[in-house]
Image (cartoon, grey):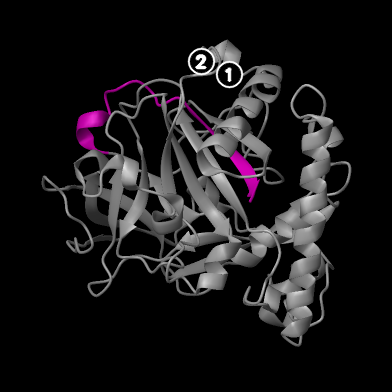
Amino acid sequence: MATVTVTETKNLEPSKTPLHAVFNYYSLPTTPAIDDLSILNGTSPNITSCSVPVADLRSLSPSLSDFNHASHGFQILHQPLPIDASHDSVHNPSTLVSQYYPSITSLLKEQLGVRSAVVINSTLRDIPAPDLSTFDPENPRPTTGSRSLSPFFIAHSDYTPAAARAHLRAMTPAWFAETGTGDGSTSAEERDLFLRLRDEIIEAEDRAVRAAGLEPRDDHTASSTEGGGGDAERKGGHWAWDGKAYAGPRYAMFSIWRPWETVRRDPLAVLVGGAEPNGPPYVPLPRTYRNRPGCVSEYYNENVLVRPPTPDNGHVWGYLSEQTPDEVLALKFYDSEALQAGGESVRLMCPHSAFRTGDMEDGPVRRSCELRVWCIW
């Protein structure tokens, strides 16, 4: 694994010198083979390590309260812990779905001003390293259950723009029933509103796709047959659309990331310097999703693998030192408004990664939870 040192610190105004830490990047400029999950479980040879600056967000200008998801791709929300954060409590799916999910959707409505917020899934991270003996290639990221993951040490942002749209389109009317997020987690009014807005979004996207001279198509599996998601297999439909001329409700996908206790090891960092508004240079990791509750039986998707920094485009990362459970990070994966603005005023995504520093490695294992959430304004 090669190691490169980058010292670029433009676009930052730190009150103290950032530390340096090693971040892992996908090293090749070409798209990986479809479902190359060695990248996700850390065994791929195509990962390079770079020593880059990491600034404490508490030391930067603007202040913490000035960071917002539109301009920066992330936002720091504040909420007292709404549930008991003990191991048994957070590993109880019923507690998460019936208590924690509603508390987070209420938080997003209050602090982001969204009309509708629906949790997609949850992931718990409270083990120090991945257990490859339990790695499930059909579902490498266990969600809404008692299984745990370790911190993820590869620079990424979960979905390409078309992949985020594909997730929304893959949902079925049975979503709430099959994911267990019906009564006790959401109200009938909340469910009806979300499904109605989802239909409005897809109809508006299809109109824009037609206006661009393309044919809307939701052949979910067409791109995952041969060749690993090559462009020739996904011509037409929203996969070939640039997202422009969309006139439906603004919508976004977020990760809502919270530690269950103060972070003293393996903190989460966000890319704050050296990236373009619509994201840094990246390659897609083609994926096939199968048998996901509430979705069509199989559909094609893409994860975002961030390319390494260069001498002309250095990266600077930021983190919240000793982040507390009351400090909740909203990390953006996709925002329909960013494509309308052309990246000039609204960030599309927030690249992120866990990282290690030597003075933290004797600390207690990080315990954290992330929810993927649809937000519609």
The amino acid pointed to by label 2 is Ala
Say which residue appears at 11% left-offset and 45% top-offset.
16
The residue lying toward the viewer, choosing from 75 and 54, is 75
Q: Confirm whether residue 153 shows in the render.
A: no
Q: Secondary structure at mark 1?
A: helix
- Count the marks: 2
Per the image, the residue denoted by label 1 is 90
Using a 10 Å C-alpha cutoff, classify the residue at mark 1 as few (fewer than 14 neighbours), some (14 to 19) or many (20 or more). many
Answer above or below: position of 5 versus 148. below
Please tell me whether mark 2 sits on a helix, a strand or a loop. Answer: loop
Q: Nearer the viewer, residue 88 or 270?
A: 270
Is 373 on the left-hand or right-hand side of 9?
right
**Relative to residue 348, is residue 213 drawn left or right?**
right
The residue sitting at the left extreme is: 16
* Residue 312 sits inside the magenta stretch: no
Q: Is there any visible trace of residue 340 in the rendered image?
A: yes
The stretch in magenta equals 357-377
Residue located beneath label 2 in the image? 85
Query: Can you give x and y, in whole percent of width and height, for residue 255 in the image?
Result: 54, 43
Q: Nearer the viewer, residue 329 or 218?
A: 329
Work out whether mark 2 precedes mark 1 in sequence or the reverse, and give the earlier one. 2
Q: In the rendering, at what x and y percent does residue 310 appear?
A: 28, 71
